Amino acid sequence: MSTSARTGWGPIGLFNPLAPVGRSWRRLRRRPAVMQVRTVLIVLGVVVGLIVWLALSPSGTAGAATPTPVSQASTSTRGVSAHSINVVFPVVAINSEAGQLGFAEDKEYNEQTYSIHVFVNQINASGGIHGRKIHPIIVSFDPANATEMRALCEQWTQGNPPVFAVIDGIGTWTGDNELCVTQEGHTPMIGAWSTITNWTELGSPYLWWTGADQAPVLSATVSWGVSSGRLAAGKKVGVVVSDQSGDQEALKQYLLPDLKKVGITPQVYTIAADLGETASTDSDATLAVERLEAAGVQSVIPLLPENAFFPYIGAENSQKYFPQLLLSDYQSTVEVALGLIPEPYEQALNGQEGVTTETLGGFDDNRPESKGGYDPGVRSCYNTWHKAHPKPIKGTTSFYIEEQGPIQAWCTSIRLFAQAAENAGPDLNRRTFVTAMSNIKDFPGGLSPVWSFGPKKMYGPTTYTVVKIHNNVPPSSQCDLKTNHKPQGTCWVVVQKSRPLPTG
C-alpha cells in the first residue's frame, strides 16, 4: 500500500521526521472497549473493575512448544456446509459490565454488533465465499467470568451449532482462552490480542494474530535502544517486570537474550501484579525506584501491566527520579503513557519514546489521504459503513469511523478471514484455510498499516515506528493535527521512520 500520503510522510514516500502524528487521550477511544474500561477503572482505583484486566491477562505460562506446521492441520470441515460457513464473533457484554460497576454504558457495543453485520452482509451480498455465505454467530460474553468463557469455547469447538472459525476483531478473547479454541479445539482463530511467540506455537497452526507478536517487539525495542544510545556498554540499564508468568517468560526467553547479544546485563526488579496484592505492588514499585536510583540506572525497560505500571510511574514521580524509558507495544506502555500526560505524570512521561507497530494515522473523517485521512484499507471500510449507515446509528453521534476504532477493526478482520477462505478454494477445510492464511501478503490492515503472514509468521504487522510522547499544552506545531477544529492536547511525534519488524 502507498505510504506517501500518510501524515508524517512527504511526497513520493519520503519520510519527514519532523512531521507530527496526532494522538491524544481520546486515543483510548480507539482501542478495544474493554481496554478502555480496564484502564479508566485502574486510574480511578476501582478495584472491582480490575477483574476485567485480570481476565484479559495470561492466566498461566504457555511453556515451550513445537509448532505444528500448516501441512499437518486437520482437514475437518466442521462448521462448513454446501451453502454456509459458521463463524463466531465474540463481543464483550460491556453494557452489562457498565451496569455492574457503576459507570456509563459504552455506545461502542452497538457499533460492534452493527459493524459485524454490515461487513459480513457485504461479503454475502457479493456471492459469499465460493457460493457459501458467512453465518455470523455473535456471542456476548463477560470477560470477568472465566467459567463462562471456558464453557463458550467448548460449545464452539465441540457442541452445536458446529463452528468453523472464531474472529475476535478487537482483542477481547485473550490468553488461555485463545489456546482453548486453537490448541484444544483445533479451530481456526483470528485474534487481535497478542503476546509472546509461545502462544502461537501452542495454538499452531490455527492461531493467527492481527496484533504484533511481542517477542519481535521486544527485539525491536532493544535494537532501537542501541541505535539511540539508550542501551550501550557502560550505561546502567534496568528492567522492571511483573511477577506474572507471561511477563517473566517474556523477560527470560526474549528480552534478556536480546540484551545479552548486545552486551547488556540489566538490573532486574520484580513488582507484584496480582490484583489482590495492591499493597505489595505499591511497595515493590517504590522499592524498585529507590534501588534503580541508588544504582545510578539511566535507562529502564518496563514489562508491566497497567496496574503495576501506574504505581511504578507514580513512584518515579514521587521520588523525582526520571530515567529514560524504553516504552513499547508490550503491555501497551507506549500507549498508556500518552494518556497519563499532562496529568498526573508530566515529568516522568513527557518526551519519553517508544516502539509501536500501530497505524500512526491522522483524522477520523473522510478527508483525502493526502491531507491526513484514512489509509486505503480503513477508507474502504468507511465507504462500506457509510453506504450502510449514511446517518449516525442509534446511540452514536457520527457516521465517520475511528481509524483505530472497533468498526474498522471488525471490518479488516472479517475481510482478512474472507480473503483466506476465498484463497482456500472451493474445498474449504481447516488445512486449506490455514495454508491460505500463511500465504497472505501485504494485506491492507487497520490497527497496523499492512499485514503479512507466513508458515512460521502467525502475526500480521511488518513494521515498527519510534514515537515520542509530547504534551501540546500550550499548543505548538508539533501536534498540529486537529479534532473538531481544536488542537490536540497530546500526541505522538515520529522520531524514527518505519522499519521492518524483526522476524527472528
Image (tube, grey):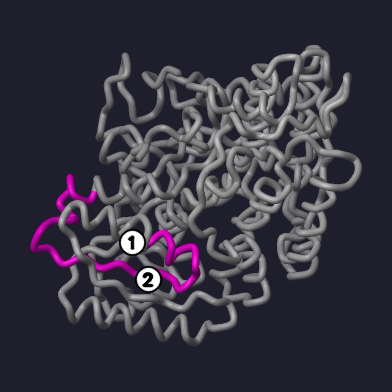
Q: Position of residue 313 (x, y in %)?
A: 37, 71
Badge 1 amino acid: Leu
Viewer can see residue 408: no
The residue sitting at 21% across, 77% down in the picture is: 293
Closer to the camera in the image, 287 or 33: 287
Mark yes or no: residue 98 visible. yes
- Left or right, residue 176 beside residue 333: right
Q: Is residue 218 above or below residue 456?
A: below
Name the residue tied to disc 2.
313
- Of the numbered discs in the image, which one, if any, rests on residue 349? 1
Q: Secondary structure at mark 2?
A: helix
Q: Is residue 10 left or right of residue 447?
A: left
Tell me where residue 362 appears, x and y as whole percent: 46, 33
Kind of element beneath mark 1: helix
Q: What residue span does the magenta drawing correspond to?
A: 225-251
| 242 in magenta | yes
Mark 2 residue crowding within 10 angstroms, few (<14) / some (14–19) / many (20+)? many
Residue beneath the point at 43% across and 68% down? 309
Mark 1 closeness class: few <14, some 14–19, many ≥20 residues within 10 Å: many
Position of 479 with respect to 114 (left or right) is left
Please tell me which residue lies in front, 356 or 433.
433
Sequence order check, earlier mark of 1 and 2: 2
